[in-house]
Image (cartoon, rainbow, N blue to C red):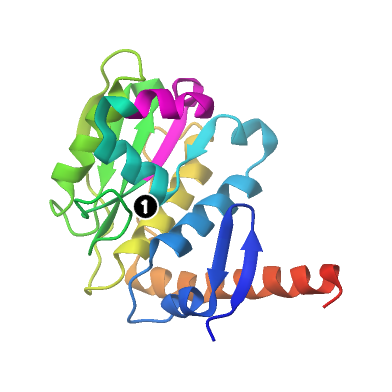
Amino acid sequence: MDQVVLSYGDSLLRISDVALLDAPHWLNDNIIGFIFEFLSSTLAPSTAERVALLGPDVSQFIKCCGNDAAEFLQPLEIPRKDLVLLPVNDNAGTEAGGTHWSLLAYLRSARQFLHYDSAPGTNAPHARLMARNLSSLLAGNPRYQEEDAPAQHNSYDCGMYVVCVAQALCEQYFRGCNNLNLENITPQYVTQKRAEWKEIIRELGSHSKATSGH
């Protein structure tokens, strides 16, 4: 039975989701969505209101729905955010999925989209489409740029690179770092983060059971 191990905000994780944090598995949209939600909830309040970490479902909607996305996104107040982070996948359908993940970042101070792809070039068409659709909400016709990103050395760690780069951007951007440093995101670091996220989920799940009296 694929039992629920954690309910956290809008995220619901089952045993099969958490098992994907063991190599050699791809992360699915449930795990990436949870990690983005967790990162958002652990930011300092003064920082949190300036950041939008959009889950895979919202990101895919932006990519697939073109100008129709603008009205749907208004409650998120994206034009007021200094940093917007969106997971990109190569699925052409309306739901999250596909076979490769990358990260699109919008930096308001630079009026620029930066695309971080651990397999360079793979998701560029999808990221460009997402940036174009999101631009209708944003002032100044933001530029788009492919960034040098930490490279995956296997076929399954793309989702882990997305969450590692997203966490690094959240930590560094508001320190006034003009040059964001991602050099520590090595294959060894990514492997270590798989174990760390499993432990975070285990601790949250244990705490949830304790507080609910089960």
Residue under the point 64% across and 63% down: 7
> Left of 125 or right of it: where is 163?
right
Queried whether the magenta region covers residue 42, the answer comes back as no
Q: Secondary structure at mark 1?
A: loop
Vertical arrangement, residue 40 with respect to residue 74, above or below: below
Q: Looking at the image, is 57 positioned above or below residue 135?
A: below
Q: Who's the residue at 36% across and 56% down the image?
A: 162
Residue 176 image point, x, y percent:
49, 31
Q: Give the amino acid at mark 1.
A: Leu
Q: Give the crowd class for mark 1: few <14, some 14-19, many >=20 residues within 10 Å.
A: some
Which residue sits at x=62%, y=75%?
5
- The answer to whether residue 121 is seen in the rendering is yes
**Number of numbered discs present?**
1
- Residue at the (42%, 58%) spot, across then down: 164
Determine whether, in the image, residue 153 is placed left or right of residue 107. left
Q: Which residue is mark 1?
A: 182
The answer to whether 5 appears left or right of 213 in the picture is left
Q: Position of residue 70 (x, y in %)?
A: 37, 24
Q: In the rendered image, which quarter contains the C terminus?
A: bottom right
Quadrant the N terminus occupies: bottom right
Image coordinates of residue 58 in percent, x first then y, are 41, 43
Q: Is residue 76 magenta?
A: yes
Q: Main secondary structure of the magenta part?
A: helix
Q: Which residues are magenta?
A: 69-86
Visible in this render: residue 146? no
Task: Give the camera-side residue of 11 and 83.
Answer: 11
Q: Residue 132 or 213: which is nearer the viewer?
A: 213
The percent position of residue 174, horizontal first and vertical second, equals 53, 34
